[in-house]
């Protein structure tokens, strides 16, 4: 299969532009909210509608590709061979429902397991972060420089709320060494902050669709993306992941091991 990363990047940016326009209109329309595993695990009619739309556009453009997505309209993907798209139609559904901002839509493209292109839209901020190793990274049409390799003491860190509150893996020891602690509630929004140097680390339990697009872009920008136990990232399973500048990730792993 001949794969052109520029062509996939253009396709994903076009798709997310459309998703952004439609979600900005939709958010004033009637929303129906249901719970999934627990009362904080929400899904709306817009999560489902958006995933159906994205997946059908991907299938039209790339009929040979397989899709891993959150809300059940994807394929049952057992291995990473060929072209695989990861789709999170609304990332930060709780923010979408409760605040109407700080939510994202994310798509990551991989070829034979290799990260190819990531695309994340900050829907209300109207920013699309996109690109990959081969073509570079952009916010909308503007090229972004790689963020500085700052140490923990010089940057803000973001840890998922449940992990930070329960002090899982003694993560509070890492938080205390940083400049400050933030919880934005959307992996996609946080990846945007990492890519533009506004935060230096994100640690969370992430599903494949939470991680895929951000991993492509953060690795392309020279940041580290590691699983907490230092095993290779598995894109077909959920895992606890640390993403950040090289200095911060190595400091974080050392600090967590020293507990
Ligand atoms: P979501 O909104 O697409 O579900 C903060 O809640 C962040 O963690 C969001 O990016 C959210 O994605 C994700 N998230 C929420 N619950 C999760 C879970 N059980 N496993 C993995 N990621 C989750
Ligand atoms: Ca969800
Ligand atoms: Ca998500
Ligand atoms: Ca989601």
Image (tube, rainbow, N blue to C red):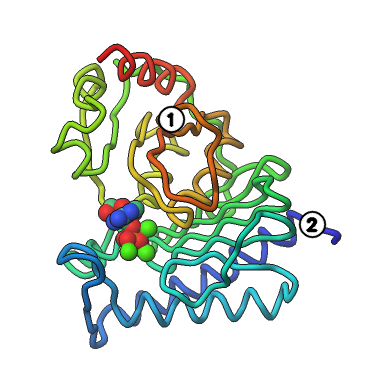
> Where 68 sits versus 29, above or below?
above
Q: Mark 1: few, some, or many residues within 10 Å (few <14, many ≥20)?
A: many
Nearest to N terminus: mark 2 or mark 1: 2
- Residue at the spot of label 1: 244
x then y, percent, for residue 125: 36, 58
Q: Is mark 2 within 8 Å of ligand 3?
A: no
Image position, residue 253 (x, y; %): 38, 20
Q: Would you say 168 lies left or right of 107 here?
A: left
View extreme (right): residue: 2
> Which label is found at residue 13?
none
User: Where is mark 2, residue-wise?
Assistant: 4
Q: Is residue 72 placed above or below 146 in the rendered structure? A: below
Taking 48 as reference, is 73 left or right? right
Q: Quadrant of the N terminus?
A: bottom right
**Location of residue 57 in the rendering, given as x and y in whole percent from the top left corner:** 61, 78
- 245 and 228: which is toward the camera: 228
| Residue 125 in view of the camera | no
| SS at circle 1 | strand
**Count of numbered badges drawn on the protein:** 2
Ligand 3 lies in quarter: bottom left
Q: Are marks 2 and 1 in contact (CB under 8 Å)?
A: no
State the residue in front, 208 or 145. Answer: 208
């Amino acid at each position: 299969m001949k794969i052109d990363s520029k062509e996939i990047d253009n396709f994903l940016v076009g798709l997310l532009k459309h998703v952004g326009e439609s979600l900005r209109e939709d958010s004033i329309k009637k929303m129906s909210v249901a719970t999934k595993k627990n009362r904080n695990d929400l899904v709306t009619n817009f999560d489902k509608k958006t995933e159906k739309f994205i997946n059908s556009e991907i299938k039209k453009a790339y009929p040979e590709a397989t899709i891993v997505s959150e809300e059940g309209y994807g394929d049952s993907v057992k291995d990473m061979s060929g072209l695989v798209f990861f789709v999170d139609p609304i990332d930060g559904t709780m923010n979408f429902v409760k605040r109407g901002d700080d939510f994202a839509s994310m798509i990551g493209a991989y070829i034979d397991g290799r990260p190819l292109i990531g695309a994340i839209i900050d829907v209300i901020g109207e920013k699309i972060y996109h690109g990959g190793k081969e073509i570079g990274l952009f916010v909308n049409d503007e090229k972004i420089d790689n963020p500085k390799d700052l140490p923990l003491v010089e940057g803000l860190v973001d840890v998922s709320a449940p992990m930070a509150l329960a002090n899982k893996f003694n993560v509070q020891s890492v938080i205390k060494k940083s400049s400050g602690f933030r919880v934005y509630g959307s992996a996609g929004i946080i990846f945007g902050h990492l890519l533009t140097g506004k935060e230096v680390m994100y640690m969370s339990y992430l599903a494949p669709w939470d991680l895929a697009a951000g991993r492509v872009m953060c690795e392309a920008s020279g940041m580290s993306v590691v699983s907490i136990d230092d095993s290779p990232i598995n894109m077909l399973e959920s895992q606890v992941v640390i993403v950040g500048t090289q200095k911060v990730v190595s400091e974080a792993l050392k600090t967590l091991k020293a507990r």
